[in-house]
Amino acid sequence: MRGVSKPLLALVAVAVLALALSACGGGSDDSTATTSAQETTATTPSGGSGDAGSPSDETKGEGESQESSGSGSSDDSSSGSDEASADFRTPGGDNSIQDYGEEPDESELEAANAALAGFMTARAKGDWEGMCAALAKAAVEPIEDLASRAPQFKGKGCAAVLETLLARSPASSRANTLTDGIASFRVEGERGFALYHGPKGVDYFVPMINEDGEWKVGALSPSEFP
């Protein structure tokens, strides 16, 4: 599925925030915030603006032409480009992320690795400012939007909201699992997915977004491959 798009990247951030808000307690304020998160998750794919909007017609055209050319990968990508993501594929399973776009050049991989490593380090240490600085606008905007609807977060920015939400979670839940760096980076246009092998044989992926030539993280936490 080469149609993985920016709405998905925004939804990852929104879904994580919704879970975090619901975990904060059972009060009415938290209930309202969680409901808002669910509503936002339901409406994001069909609308929205900015980075959370739908892909451009040009991007759609590229995806359609690629899919119509065969099984989803060209001769060029089936050899070198797909090799790095081969370890993450599941035979007969959903490999939409593993087959998304193509592997970029080494400089892009290094830039994405540095961005994700910085984010994961900040997350593990509880450096909320560092986390927010590493996040893409598509991930920060839903946080600030949802926070503005919850009275307990009124007037607070990204870092303050993350501190309130994530500081309560066990430090082990924010452990840095990026032990050996990004193993595969699937990119199409300004969007991508970083794939890496974590501890205990668990594989992860993280959405990434290129903003003004700089790779940013598109979610509040890595996701495990099924």
Image (spheres, grey):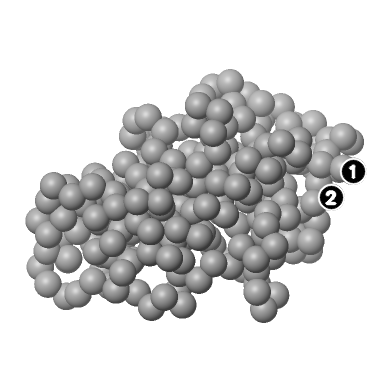
| Contact, mark 2 vs mark 1 (Cβ under 8 Å) | yes
> Residue at 35% across / 51% down in the picture?
129
Which label sits on residue 129?
Answer: none
> Residue at 50% across / 42% down in the picture?
216
Q: Is residue 57 above or below residue 69?
A: above
> Residue at 16% across / 55% down in the picture?
153
Q: Which amino acid does label 2 sit on?
A: Glu
Q: What residue type is labelled 1?
A: Ser
- Residue at the extreme top: 58
The image quarter containing residue 91 is bottom right
Q: Is residue 38 toward the left or the right of residue 195 in the image?
A: left
User: Where is residue 137 shown, x and y percent of the image?
Assistant: 39, 38
Q: Kindly state the secondary structure of the residue where label 1 is placed.
A: helix
Q: Can residue 163 be seen in this view?
A: yes
Disc 1 target residue: 79
User: Where is residue 8 shown, x and y percent of the image?
Assistant: 48, 46
User: Where is residue 148 shown, x and y percent of the image?
Assistant: 17, 47
Q: Residues within 10 Å of mark 2 (few under 14, many from 20)?
A: few
Disc 2 target residue: 83
> Residue at 87% across / 34% down in the picture?
76
Q: How crowded is mark 1: few (under 14 residues within 10 Å), some or many (20 or more)?
A: few
**Which is more toward the observer, 85 or 165?**
165
Q: Kindly state the secondary structure of the residue where label 2 is placed.
A: helix
Q: Is residue 38 visible?
A: no
